[in-house]
Amino acid sequence: MKIPLSWLREFVEIDIPPELLAEKLTAAGLEVAKIEYIGVPQARVEGLRYPNSDHLVWDRSKLLLGAIREVKPHPNADRLVLAMVDYGGAEIEQCVTGAPNLFEFKGQTLDKPLYTIIALEGAEVWDGHSDEPKRMILKEKPLRGIPNRSMVCSEKELGMSESHDGIILMREDPGYAPGTPAQDVLGDVIFEIELTPNLARCYSVFGVAREIAALLDKPLKAPDYAVQESGEPVSGTVEITITDSKLNPRFTAMLLRNTRIQPSPEWLQRRLQAVGQRPINNIVDVTNYVMFEMGQPLHAFDYDRLIAHAGGKTPHLTTRLARPGETLKTLDGTVRELTPKDIVITDNSDTPISLAAVMGGFDTEISDDTTNVLLEAANWEFISIRRTTHAHKLFSEAGTRFSRGVHPSQAMLGVRRGIELMRQTGGGAVARGVIDVYPDPAPVIKIDLPESEIRRIMGMDFSASEAAALLKRAAFEVTVEGEVMHVTVPDYRLDIGTGVVGQADLIEEIARINGFEHIPVTIITDEMPPQRPNPHLTLEEKTRDLLTQLGFREQISYRLTTPEAEALLVPAGAESSLPKVDYIRLANPITLDKTVLRHTLLSSLLGNAIENARYTNRQQVFEIGSIYLPREGEVLPDEPRRLGILITGARHIGGGWMGADTDAVVDFFDLKGAVEHLLAGLHVEGAHFARAEHTSYHPGRSAALVINGVNAGTFGELHPLVARAIGWESDPVLLGELDLDAILNAARPLFRLTPLPVTPPVLQDVALVVNDTVSAEAVEQVIRKAGGDLLKGVRLFDVYTGDQIPAGHKSLAYALTYQTDERTLTDKEVASVHAKIVKAAERELGAKLRA
């Protein structure tokens, strides 16, 4: 939100540099993200974080306010004129200019001067004719035979905007004498403030001024809410019905008769432009002006159109929820289908004429022919407005304020301020009185705050009188009785709670106004609480460490997805292996691709992989996060933790754990090795791999992790049909989803350490031909059992099918390590154990020793 310093000064005296003010606002919670300087110099304040600006500083002696007294034709050029400018000097300055907005005055001596900014010889300005930002110094030179040493300036030449269609022209007296430095007339500082939703009270210039008054301990001057009422009474001109006071707590209206639609005064237009708004006409501009000034959005109806809608009768406006099938043509000309959660304003025929708090209707808008204006200032339930803005994608300044909360009290102030400004800018007579429908007035919040509670929560000593003085600076009403403060909260402070929550809010307010930087840094005086271990958290962090050791990177993705996205993980016609339970659905999803809580991590892993594939051909990531499964009879879902792993692309890039074959891509065994590394690092006992049948994985290239007889997840190559469905066209994807809770529960914090061997090992290989249906794990179990204590290590290093291997069979080659600490093994001892292993494999598995 843009806040001009010149506008702030209408409400509060500011006697510190803008940069220091920005620091104070930021420290108080109103973050000033940027400071924009218009013509004025930047203050140099030691230690402040705002960078030096390269903006154009207007020379106070060479860039001045000028009054154009006469516009003469150029004797040698039809497209040039001679502007005779009074700049407070001894003589009128003649400026040669081609500004098109002066041509209508060509050949005229002006009884009422036009005001502009004149740049005298030697002034530095921006080159208005250059496409690239470029500064220039004015020097005297003739233009079509006429000497010229000065220039009347456009906004672009002064660095105010990119407008170069004409020079700055002020048809109204700016209140300064010719020759006044341009800095004093149009110079300004614009703060760009980023506000959090809890600072709804600050979404206006006056709201920020209130904060400044509290922080600087300065008096605050409120806008003028007085109205000159001279017309017939407003009573009987319109009827208002509120069907639900929770959705529409208050509705106020005032009537302006016989006004004119015309451009707004220049001061008002400049104010709107400073906050980023485009001036339209005096009525529309006033509604925007009041919203930015004090935070209350307004809406203006063409009163005669309302009467026409009512068939010549008294207009009757009703606020209610929209009904299914209703539509509304909004101000932008779009016909919108309303939802049953939209609040609408209807006419006598119960037809919607406005989308409350978001956008008015096309049929009752202000036009150039409008003469009678009904001005509405209402209050709306913020959650409904937030829902409507997102549903219709209508994000407006009014919607922003209402969706964060505006107190009903502001409606009366806003309608009075707006109707008077409309009268001042367009003429007419304001009908006497205000239509005010306020069924359930908001309660006044009162809080008792003991002095001792401040010390307990904040850790600082404040007497009740000292704390009361700080709260009064922020417009709280406070009376002190002994050590207790009785506080009445300003109505616009929707962020202050009640009871103990309200006490904490008040203490925060005391600290904020006093300055958080004044809270002393102290060492805890109490005894440190006992430090209790959190084994699961420790093991979860160790899981991260083990995977990052292998080169994996952690990703964190949204827990929200859609059923359709997860359905892509199941090939068409297959029975899903994913959890067969209902989804936890969001009542009010922010976007269409985040409507339910996920059942699996696979969808987010693959979604991110598709995005990242545009930038790299090798990915190696993991994610630790919960899935969400409803529990029968329970409000909250079960949230088991899962570990997701994904690798794809080249096996080796400049070093790594996957080997040195730079041409190879990763396969199932690379992923299996990562899982084995993780299990070994966590000292998980009772784990083995089994054949898996999961619809999301490639048949025959996947495995289940089984821990103590319980399935703890599946991993393997992505099913080709799933890859095609999600649009994956690169190298095979290896991924898995493991039950992290099951893994960590099986991890052993205490484990047996084996001393380093003191005797040399004997290394031998064995290749066994077995049936295709026999798993490598089954073969390894037989080998270990038969090898006994002398067999220290078994490692599968080759799987072969093809020539010399019978059909339906495969060759499994194992590297065996024989060793004992008692002695060096002889060849005879090793041969005996080796033969025993071969015989056991033949007997139990039907294996044959490969020749």
Image (cartoon, helix red, strand yellow):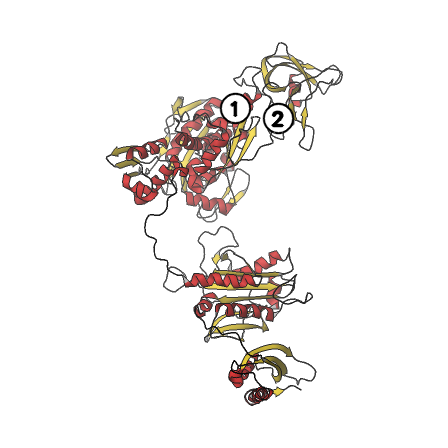
**Position above or below: 649 against 386:** below
Q: In this view, does 363 lie to the left or right of 510?
A: right
Report whether 496 appears left or right of 74.
Answer: left
Relative vertical location of residue 85 with respect to residue 333 in this rendering, above or below? above
Q: Is mark 2 on a helix, strand or loop?
A: helix
Q: Can residue 113 be seen in this view?
A: yes
Res. 158 mark: 2
Instruction: Say which quarter of the image contains residue 186.
Output: top right
Q: Name the residue under label 1.
A: 267
Task: Give me the disc on residue 543.
Answer: none
| Residue at (23% x, 35% y) in the render | 482
* Residue 737 or residue 97, whichever sits in front: 737
Toward the left, the furthest residue is 482
- Check the picture and name the quadrant holding the C terminus: bottom right
Position in image of residue 238 (x %, y %): 40, 32
**Please, what is the three-letter code of the amino acid marked with disc 2?**
Leu
| 605 over 786 or under it: above or below | above
Q: Is mark 1 on a helix, strand or loop?
A: helix
Q: Is residue 265 visible?
A: no
Q: Which of marks 1 and 2 is nearer the N terminus?
A: 2
Inter-mark Cα distance, 1 to 2: 18 Å
Q: Residues within 10 Å of mark 1 (few under 14, many from 20)?
A: few
What type is the residue that disc 1 sits on? Trp
Given residues 540 and 350, the one toward you in this image is 540
Percent position of residue 498, x then y: 31, 42
In the image, residue 704 sits, relative to residue 641, either above or below, namely below
- Residue 598 x %, y %: 49, 60
